[in-house]
Image (spheres, grey):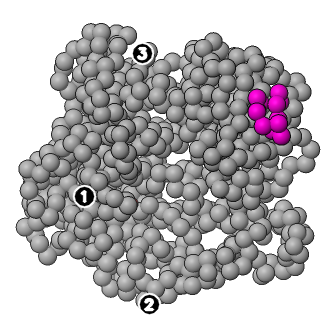
């Protein structure tokens, strides 16, 4: 695959651009080019919602306007990320072909409106998409201005129409072969829900079936599979016209409606739309927002094992947060540097020019309604453009990581649908972040893998709450430890199989109980305001506290073949005392820890950081970082190390440097100390 970098070997700086809203204002379109150049924009994402302008009447294709704009942009040094328009169907189409409109879980068909709401199964919509994509591909797939295909927009959602129901049944038939197998996998003898004919199977609905967990899980898998199939239909004409032009789809941070990982075999580049809720605390501590954002960036970088694109972020404010605070001075630069630090090869905005009407008219844009260039936003965007222009050497640079945390979508679905032991948020994502936080704070790079990825490259693998465990994953975890890996398992692991059926016998299942040397006994979930206590009996590392608080989910286990490092230490006589909470066992060349409860954040820092040190896991920058200060590293193709230093607090901070660094923008050198102003950030190289 040719890289988009072949055409444009620079960091991308761009924005969603919607000229279709301004076709009757040629002076504005002309002005846009001038403004883009001033802001240092070198690419635009174009055509995303332009179907009505591209095909105003059925089969009446009007691509000339788009062609002219793409050409003019190109003549001015601005490339295009060309979108397929399927994210918003035209009104005429929705009225002429009602079947393309989605049906919700209550079996009510949408009226025309909104976007991202077409049926993925409808043969008519698939045909229409193929036709328009063919036209776009014929015209633009070999156009030198086009860097990349942007498939649809924020692919999401599900449809419960009769076509989808039938496709679901066919998908189930192919998967299970017989109703007997399906009934067994779904445990339908429970409540007399046994199916006696395929036609009786319906998608989950609040008005009908929600109790068969295997069905719920399969429905999500089917929606994912149908989306992947729709995606394949979208890209077929594009790839036929030019197999080398890469495709991407813009993901939404931690969106869990479909399993994005399943789209990866069809994608050349991962991109995502990043909208953290900055400025929502009273103490100015932005580290929570930054950490959330960085974690999703790490997921996107890990997905294909290479840099991702930041496809959208707001240059100022959104229009859909509860309170839409604009990024305060300096925040655009700071958050852009954080993206570059975690593996982004672009900074792109939603949107270039602010719409005049409809529901996004108050969303921030590079160019606001005033059309002026002396706005703070325009100036800050131009500043980012200038910075990116000095970073050609960073294109494609990797983020080396020796640690991984597992976050798996099917597991997330299953554990959150489990009905017990804790229905007020079982906390799988919370536990993920308890692992992520100390690494993030200490500047230890982390990859985020799912259950299907290769674990062998990591020295340390943290597996929080892998409730849904496939035999095959368990075997790879066992092999990983035997070959020398350090694995951390936690409470609520290895409970159900891929059908969401509980494993019989000892758990964690599929050999993980034997691997960890522990056996599950019972779970004690706590209310949010409750806690229990763990006491370290054999502290694995010096400087750990004697006790730590436990909350949310406290599991009781028997340590049959493992060293007990910490035990429950509860005052309440009816709660367990002396039972294991943290254990360790060696197997082959590796070791496995089992943590039986949610521990407070301090435990994770006190335990994970010395563990990482004992495994010689490298920090991005070998320095102690003050609270809220991040340090990241990327290594360019020529071996140059880039360092990204960010201060997410409102106080000035100083980093004590292990070696001298030079600011890549200003050229300024720092020998021993690097001061960062409040919310300041710099990119540096060793001097
Ligand atoms: C994104 C979407 C854009 C725009 C933006 C506003 O989710 O892809 O089209 O609506 O939100 O923040």
Percent x, y for residue 124?
A: 51, 81
Give me the residue at 45% from left, 25% from top: 443
Check disc 3 and report the residue beneath it.
623
For the residues labelled 2 and 1, the Cα–Cα distance comes to 35 Å
Give me the residue at 35% from left, 44% from top: 282
Label 3 Cα crowd, 10 Å radius (few <14 / some 14-19 / many 20+): some
- N-terminal of the pair, mark 3 or mark 2, is 2
Provide the residue span drawn in magenta: 568-579
Front position in the image: 357 or 145: 357
Percent x, y for residue 637?
A: 38, 25
Q: Is mark 3 within 8 Å of ligand 1?
A: no
- Identify the image quadrant of residue 570: top right
Check disc 2 and report the residue beneath it.
96
Q: Is residue 578 visible?
A: yes
In the structure shown, which secondary structural element does the residue marked by tag 3 occupy?
loop
Q: Residue furthest bottom?
A: 96
Label 1 Cα crowd, 10 Å radius (few <14 / some 14-19 / many 20+): many
Front position in the image: 573 or 424: 573
Check disc 1 and report the residue beneath it.
364
Give left or right: position of 223 versus 417: left
Percent x, y for residue 615?
A: 61, 16
């Amino acid at each position: 695959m040719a890289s988009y970098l072949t055409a444009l070997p620079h960091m991308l700086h761009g924005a969603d651009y919607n000229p279709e809203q301004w076709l009757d204002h040629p002076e504005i379109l002309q002005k846009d080019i001038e403004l883009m150049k001033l802001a240092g924009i070198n690419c635009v994402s174009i055509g995303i919602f332009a179907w009505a302008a591209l095909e105003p009447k059925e089969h009446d294709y009007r691509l000339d306007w788009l062609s002219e704009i793409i050409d003019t942009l190109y003549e001015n040094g601005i490339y295009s990320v060309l979108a397929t328009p399927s994210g918003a169907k035209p009104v005429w189409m929705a009225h002429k072909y009602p079947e393309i409109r989605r049906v919700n879980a209550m079996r009510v068909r949408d009226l025309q409106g909104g976007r991202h709401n077409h049926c993925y199964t409808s043969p008519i919509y698939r045909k229409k998409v193929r036709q328009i994509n063919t036209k776009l591909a014929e015209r633009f797939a070999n156009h030198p201005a086009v860097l990349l295909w942007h498939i649809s927009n924020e692919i999401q959602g599900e449809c419960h129409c009769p076509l989808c129901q039938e496709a679901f049944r066919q998908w189930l038939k192919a998967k299970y072969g017989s109703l007997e197998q399906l009934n067994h996998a779904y445990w339908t003898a429970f409540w007399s829900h046994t199916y006696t004919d395929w036609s009786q199977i319906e998608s989950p609905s609040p008005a009908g079936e929600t109790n068969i967990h295997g069905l719920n899980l399969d429905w999500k898998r089917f929606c994912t599979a149908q989306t992947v199939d729709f995606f394949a239909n979208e890209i077929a004409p594009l790839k036929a016209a030019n197999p080398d032009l890469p495709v991407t789809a813009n993901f939404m941070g931690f969106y869990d409606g479909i399993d994005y990982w399943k789209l990866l075999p069809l994608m050349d580049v991962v991109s995502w739309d990043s909208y953290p809720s900055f400025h929502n605390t009273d103490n100015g501590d932005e580290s929570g927002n930054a950490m959330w954002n960085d974690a999703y960036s790490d997921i996107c970088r890990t997905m294909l094992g290479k840099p991702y694109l930041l496809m959208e972020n707001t240059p100022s404010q959104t229009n859909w947060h509860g309170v839409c605070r604009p990024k305060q001075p300096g925040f655009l630069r700071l958050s852009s540097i954080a993206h570059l630090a975690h593996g982004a090869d672009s900074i792109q905005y939603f949107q270039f020019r602010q719409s005049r009407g409809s529901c996004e008219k108050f969303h921030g844009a590079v160019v606001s309604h005033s059309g002026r260039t002396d706005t703070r936003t325009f100036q800050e965007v131009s500043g980012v453009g200038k910075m990116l222009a000095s970073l050609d050497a960073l294109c494609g640079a990797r983020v080396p990581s020796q640690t991984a945390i597992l976050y798996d979508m099917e597991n997330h679905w299953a554990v959150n649908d489990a009905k017990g032991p804790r229905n007020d948020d079982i906390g799988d994502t919370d536990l993920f972040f308890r692992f992520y936080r100390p690494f993030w704070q200490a500047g230890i790079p982390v990859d985020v893998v799912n259950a299907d990825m290769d674990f062998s490259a990591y020295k340390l693998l943290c597996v929080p709450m892998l409730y849904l465990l496939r035999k095959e994953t368990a075997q790879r975890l066992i092999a990983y430890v035997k070959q020398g890996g350090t694995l951390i398992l936690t409470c609520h692991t290895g409970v159900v199989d891929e059908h969401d059926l509980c494993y019989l016998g000892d758990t964690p299942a599929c050999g993980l109980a034997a691997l960890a040397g522990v056996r599950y006994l019972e779970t004690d979930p706590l209310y949010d305001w409750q806690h229990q206590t763990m006491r370290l009996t054999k502290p694995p590392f010096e400087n750990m506290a004697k006790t730590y608080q436990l909350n949310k989910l406290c599991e009781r286990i028997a340590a049959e073949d493992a060293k007990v490092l910490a035990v429950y230490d509860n005052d309440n006589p009816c709660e367990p005392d002396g039972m294991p909470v943290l254990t360790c066992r060696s197997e082959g060349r590796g070791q496995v820890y089992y943590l039986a409860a949610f521990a407070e954040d301090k435990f994770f820092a006190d335990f994970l950081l010395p563990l990482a040190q004992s495994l010689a896991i490298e920090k991005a920058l070998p320095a102690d970082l003050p609270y809220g200060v991040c340090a990241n590293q990327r290594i360019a193709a020529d071996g140059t190390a880039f360092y990204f230093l960010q201060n997410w607090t409102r106080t000035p901070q100083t980093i004590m440097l292990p070696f001298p660094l030079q600011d890549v923008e200003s050229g300024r050198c720092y020998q021993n100390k690097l001061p960062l102003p409040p919310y300041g950030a710099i990119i540096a190289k060793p001097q």
